Amino acid sequence: MNNKFVKKLRLDNDYSQEYVAKKIGISRTSYIAVEQGKKELCLSEAEALSGLYHISIDDLVTNNKKKHAKYEQMLFAFLRELDGDRKVPKTKLAKLLYFSDFAWFYFHHKSMSGLEYRKIAHGPVPDYYFRLIEELDGDGKIEIDPTEKGALLISETRVGEKVGADLLDKKEKEMIKKIAASWKDKSTKEIVDFAHSQIPYTFVEKGEIIPYELITQEEPAHVY
């Protein structure tokens, strides 16, 4: 457990030590020991803490700032590649990011962002995705417009244009460009159906982390 990050999360959210301790089911004294790096949380306590902050346990352990920054750059790279569409459905954007990570693993034996993906009803997605969308909206980097059918459309703002792409190398950018081109004219339903038909999504149970290694069982034409 990254005790300094755990403390920062509490302070950033203006929570007291007593409040967090009650939320995860331990005493205030025990929680103080966690922030001091003198005590480790058990799995159920760690899950409660990650749920409180809406992040994954992996985030609590490693404080993946660089991974998060790269994932953010990947998101903006897709928005820019799909600039002709102007607004990209939130669900479709999540699938494009999933394809980039798992396709990169398929060809290079490591993911592009390094984040963990979880199986949920709407598809494979990192826990961080939803928090990132909220943060980008709050920072004015993206604009979110609801449709009459309830879908959320995402577009880059002038503030978002300042987000760089220095964490993405040339080959990663080329992969993102290829994936965007493959799905540019396809509907959200088509991309959802495709992602849900892949081995990584069908193999695991709902709520479980999806092992990247499962994508290697797919045929090349069915990676993205």
Image: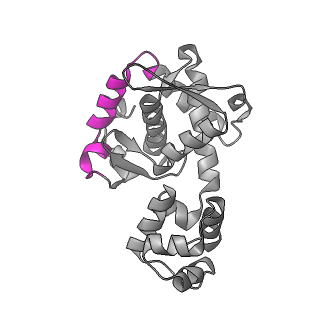
Q: Please state if 29 lies on the left or on the right of 103 as rendered.
A: right
Q: Position of residue 178 (x, y in %)?
A: 51, 25
Q: Is residue 214 highlighted in magenta?
A: no
- Name the residue: 25% across, 49% down: 203
Q: Which of the 4 quarters of the picture holds residue 171?
A: top right
Closest to the observer: 100 or 132? 132
Front residue (pair 175, 16): 16
- Between 218 and 195, the one nearer to me in the picture: 195
Q: What secondary structure is the stretch in magenta mostly built from?
A: helix
Give the residue displayed 47% in from the left and 74% down from the top: 22
Question: Quarter of the image containing the C terminus?
Answer: top left
Instruction: Give the quadrant of residue 197.
Output: top left
The x, y position of residue 158, in whole percent, is 72, 25
Q: Residue at x 60, y 36 (%)?
A: 137
Q: Give the position of the N terminus as an image quadrant.
A: bottom right
Count the marks: how many?
A: 0
- Within the magenta stretch, is there residue 197? yes
Place of residue 68 in the rendered image (x, y in percent of width and height, measured from the top left):
59, 49
Horizontal and vertical percent position of residue 31: 54, 79
**As drawn, which residue projects farthest toward the right?**
162
| Picture layout, residue 45 above or below residue 202 | below
In this rendering, the answer to whether 81 lies above or below 205 is: above
Residue 156 lies left or right of residue 198; in this view the side is: right
Q: Is residue 38 left or right of residue 205?
A: right
Q: Magenta segment, which residues? A: 183-206
